[in-house]
Amino acid sequence: MSNAAVTATPDPAAILQIGFGFWPAKTLLSAVELDLFTVLGEQPLTGAQIADRLGFGSRATYDFLDGLVALRLLERAGSGPDARYANTVDTAAFLDANSPAYIGGVLEMAGARFYPFWGGLTEALKTGEPQNEVKHTGHSVFETLYAAPDKLEQFMRALAGIGVGNFHALAQKFDFSRYQSLCDAGGATGLQSVIVAQHHPHLRCTTFDLPAVEPIARRTVAEAKLSDRVDVAAGDFFADPLPKADVITMGMILHDWNLEKKLQLIRAAYDALPEGGAFIAVENLIDDERRENVFGLMMSLNMLIETGDGFDYTGADFRGWCELVGFRSVEILPLAGPASAAIAYK
C-alpha cells in the first residue's frame, strides 16, 4: 500500500474551531456580564424566568442558554419551556459572584476591554502601536485606569481573579520557611500578600502599589483580619525604592513593560533584597522552545494590544536578565495552569 493511500484526509475542523473561537468566547463573556451565573446561584430557573430576570427581549434566549449547556457551562434538567437551567460545579464555584472563589473579574475585563481591543490585532502587528484607550485618547492604559475609580476597581478585581490560583499555588509550593518577610511589588488588591500570610503565619508581608490603589488594598487586608501582619505601602516602583524584604514578588508585572523597564524592576528587586533573598516573578512563562504555552503566547500578544512594547517571556529570558543584574541562580516553579514562578536568588 502506498504512503498516499494511508495518509489521512485533511480535516478543517480544528482550523474552523479556532477561527470561530470568538463565538463561544463572547457567549461566555456576555453571560458573565449579565450576571447569569450569579442569578442561577440562587436557584435553577426556566428559560422564561431567566429572560425576565435578565431583561431579554430577543427570540434567542434558548439558543443562548442551550449554547451554554453545550459548552458545559450550564446544566439543564428536562427540555422545552419547563426545563430548568442551573450552574455546573465549576461555574457555581468560579462564576457566581457570591462565591469566595469567584474569578469573573478577569472575564468582566475581558468582555469590556480585551474583546473590542483585539479587533485591532492586525493593525497592532503592522504598526507596533497599542489598540486600547491610548489609540483614542492619547493616554496610556495605566493613566486611563488609575484616573477612573470604577475602571480601577474592575482592573483590580480582574488581577485578583486571574491570580488567585497562582497565589495559593505559590504559597503551597515555595519554601517560605527560610524567610521572615515578603514585599509584593505591584500588589494591587493585596490578595497575594493576604494568601501568603494565611499560609505562613510567621511571615510579615507588605503589599506595595501606587497611592490610588492603597484604599483597595487596605480593605482587602482588613476583611481578611490580617492588618497586624500585612502592611500596605504606597509608592511608584519606577521612582521609589522597593520596601526591604527577604522575598520580593511581582505578579503579572514584568510582562507589562519593555526590556529596559523590565531590567529596571529586576534591579530594584535586587537592591531591596538581602544576600540569600529571593525575587519571584509570577507570570504565564512561555516555554523555552516557544511551542506549548498557548496562553502565555496569547498574553504576550495582549501586551502588544495594551502597551505596544510590553511582552511576555520565557524562563531562559528571565534567567539571562537576572544573571545580568547579579542574581546568582534561577529556578522555575510551575504553578496553576499555564503560570509559573520564576525565582532568582541573590
Image (tube, rainbow, N blue to C red):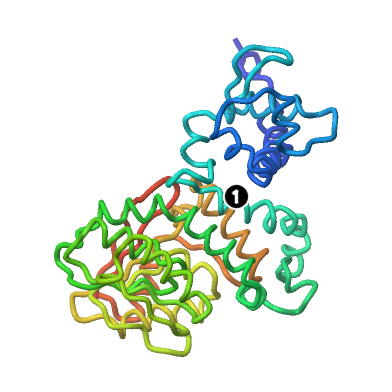
In this rendering, position of residue 191 left or right of residue 306: left
Q: Does residue 173 appear anywhere in the picture?
A: yes
- Please say if 113 is above or below 130: above
Residue that mark 1 sits on: 107
Disc 1 is placed on an element classified as helix
Q: Residue at x 63, y 56 (%)?
A: 109
Q: Amino acid at mark 1?
A: Leu
Q: In the picture shown, does residue 146 fall above or below 73?
A: below
The front one of 129 and 61 is: 61
Along the line of sight, which residue is nearer the eye, 154 or 268?
154
Is residue 278 at all visible to an observer of this figure? no
Q: Nearer the viewer, residue 265 or 84?
A: 84
Q: Is residue 212 above or below residue 188?
A: below
Give whichever of 44, 172 is nearer the camera. Answer: 44
Residue plotted at (64% across, 38% down): 36
In which quadrant of the rendered image does the N terminus lie?
top right
- x and y percent of residue 267 in the render? 37, 83
Residue that protrudes farthest toward the top in the picture = 1
- Quarter-of-image position of residue 135: bottom right
Quadrant in which the C terminus appears: bottom left
Q: Locate residue 344, reporting x and y percent.
A: 29, 69
Residue appearing at x 34%, y 79% in the figure: 269
Q: Residue furthest right?
A: 58
